[in-house]
Image: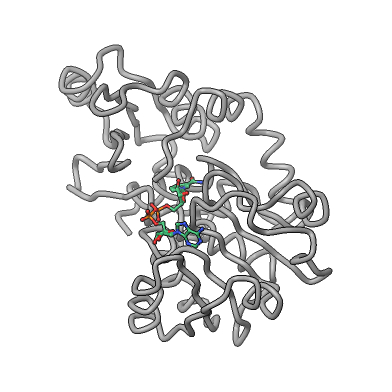
Amino acid sequence: MTRLSSEIVVPVISELDLYDRELIQKTGKNLRQIAAVSVGTAEAEIAKPVSSISTAVIPITAGGGVIDGFAPAVRAIISHLGFNSFVTRHNDVAGLAEGVEKGVDVVFLSDDKRFIALNLKERFIADNAESTGRGFATALKLMADNLTGRKVLVIGAGKVGRSAMFRLKEYNADIAVYDIVRPKAQKAAEDFGAEVEEDLGDALRHNPLIFDASPAQGVLRAVDITPSTLIAACGMPLILDAGAYKLVKERLIHDPLQIGVATMLFSAVFCC
Ligand SMILES: NC(=O)c1ccc[n+]([C@@H]2O[C@H](COP(=O)([O-])OP(=O)(O)OC[C@H]3O[C@@H](n4cnc5c(N)ncnc54)[C@H](O)[C@@H]3O)[C@@H](O)[C@H]2O)c1
């Protein structure tokens, strides 16, 4: 996974209301509703956990170290969804102890390899890569209205891409997959009944529904965008160049943290 930076995560905190409005315009649902749909939760079911569940975000210094603003951004997303949340005063093991001693139900913690939400009572882990694939697949489905029998091109068959493919299959989509490492695309094809694309340019020409789960930057150009193009792009950085972005920004779902964290939260709370 691409390591995030303060420049990317800090603006998330002040832009959550704006992002909700953008999501409603594009999908008909806000962040909380997208996450709830992703984990199959009805709006009414959410009310109880909101008032009773508390969460802590623990800064972790391992690996590349704490990204300034990351833990506050995660906390802000959780609070925006209506749940109690705080960033622990201490880092690492002391932070975990602090969270448990304060009686929290779910802790969020991330190093360079994994970002998880751990439901302490239920011993359930919600993984960010899995949740991001799941949440963005749901956002694409909502934006497209219905994916049944429609082909989605998934770019990147790593952790997020494979989670997305699993969900897209549940939404009855057909899947075409492209990965710069061909055996990864082939493995995904076997596992998800997908069709392997050999050439990204060709694949983009005949697949207007796109799910990007790769770290590729600027490889999608204006020439690849048609009036029916819809894109869910969780890959970091953004796969679009400036020309393509201008053409498709009203039909593009892209964020660095929000949908993944929201889906992790509901996944951890409802253990699913
Ligand atoms: N927006 C979010 O909330 C969020 C959350 C998690 C991960 N991400 C991002 O999503 C992307 C995927 O994450 P992951 O954990 O699945 O990573 P991963 O390393 O497991 O998988 C990435 C896949 O993309 C493939 N790839 C690399 N360059 C490519 C290219 N030019 N064209 C096609 N395929 C290419 C790799 O071979 C690999 O299979 C990363 O950019 C990561 O930073 C975003």
Q: Is 186 left, or right, of 213 in this rendering?
A: left
Q: Is 38 left, or right, of 103 in this rendering?
A: right
Q: Residue at x 79, y 59 (%)?
A: 222
Where ligand 1 lies, by quadrant? bottom left
Q: Position of residue 8 (x, y in %)?
A: 56, 30
Quadrant for the C terminus in the image: bottom left
In depth, the one of 247 and 10 nearer the eye is: 247
Q: Is residue 184 above or below residue 10?
A: below
Q: Is 217 left, or right, of 134 in this rendering?
A: right
Q: Residue at x 52, y 60 (%)?
A: 37
Q: Is residue 267 above or below residue 147?
A: above
Q: Position of residue 150 (x, y in %)?
A: 63, 83
In depth, the one of 47 and 74 nearer the eye is: 74
In depth, the one of 271 and 50 nearer the eye is: 271
Q: Residue at x 28, y 34 (%)?
A: 111
Q: Colour scheme in the image?
A: one colour
Q: Residue at x 30, y 25 (%)?
A: 58
Q: Position of residue 162 (x, y in %)?
A: 39, 67
Numbered circles on residues, count: 0
Q: Is residue 216 above or below residue 197?
A: above
In depth, the one of 189 and 219 nearer the eye is: 219
- Residue 57: quarter of image: top left
Q: Residue furthest top?
A: 89
Q: Position of residue 112 (x, y in %)?
A: 30, 36
